Amino acid sequence: MKSLKRRNELLSVCRQHVLPAGLAVVPEPYIPYVPTEWNGLLVLAEAQNLSGTRNSSYRRSLIAMSPRERMERLGRIEDIGIQPWDDGSLKLAVEATFGEAADRTSVSNAVLWSQVDEKDRNKKPSRELIKRSVEVWADFLAVLNPAHVVTAGIVARDIIYSVMPKRDVPHTALPHSSPLVMSRVSGKYDEADLRRRYPEVDAVIHRRPGWADKYRQNTVVFACHAVSLVRDEGGLF
């Protein structure tokens, strides 16, 4: 009953923040994925990519949905629908760093809409969408009351920083886990050495080997960096 009440309240927030037509690929924001047995941890990536060049089939599915279905999109079509979570990189980092089961963690994006340019390529979120996302998250956090928020990337970090004066919630800011970002640094490290130095990461890889299958070197380095940031307050890079 509690989870149903929370879901209805989150949907009510979304209905108050639907955009005028033309500002984004779809006008509705969407509620976070919250598992039934939620551990209180909320993890935010940056934004969905709904460009025609990257995710056209997913976009077509969204456009065919009703407004409510779009608001409840996470977990409806793909695994969750948050790429760095679904590819394993954030799952591995979060479970290793915080000792919390990933399947009990709430997940979303900080920017709740997606934009494309005139060539149908993914576009960085505009200031307007970031401002509106701050407003939505202020309302979302009042409903969710998470025990801890983890952000991945500068955009997600800044949105939550903007909300935090209104909400006293612990926040851990991680870098972006995208392959483009991580490939610039991951080649400097040896996986076997890192797994010896970070047994938390090694333990999760043994338990959840599939999480490191895609972009393996990047995923392992990112997880070790996350553990290092929280444990050593320094990080690998």
Image (cartoon, rainbow, N blue to C red):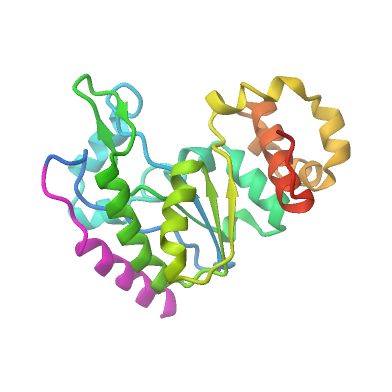
Quadrant location of residue 125?
top left
Task: Give left or right: position of 67 versus 237.
Answer: left
Nearest to the observer: residue 128 or residue 9 = 128
Find the magenta span and give its range. 1-21
Task: Give left or right: position of 233 versus 14.
Answer: right
Q: Position of residue 218 (x, y in %)?
A: 65, 28
Quadrant location of residue 224?
top right
Identified at 66% across, 45% down, the residue is 93
Q: Is residue 92 above or below residue 102?
A: above
Identified at 65% across, 58% down, the residue is 101
* Position of the C terminus by quadrant: top right
Q: Position of residue 115 (x, y in %)?
A: 26, 35
Q: Is residue 68 above or below residue 176?
A: below
Identified at 78% across, 25% down, the residue is 189
Is residue 108 rendered magenta in the image?
Answer: no
Q: Position of residue 135 (x, y in %)?
A: 30, 60
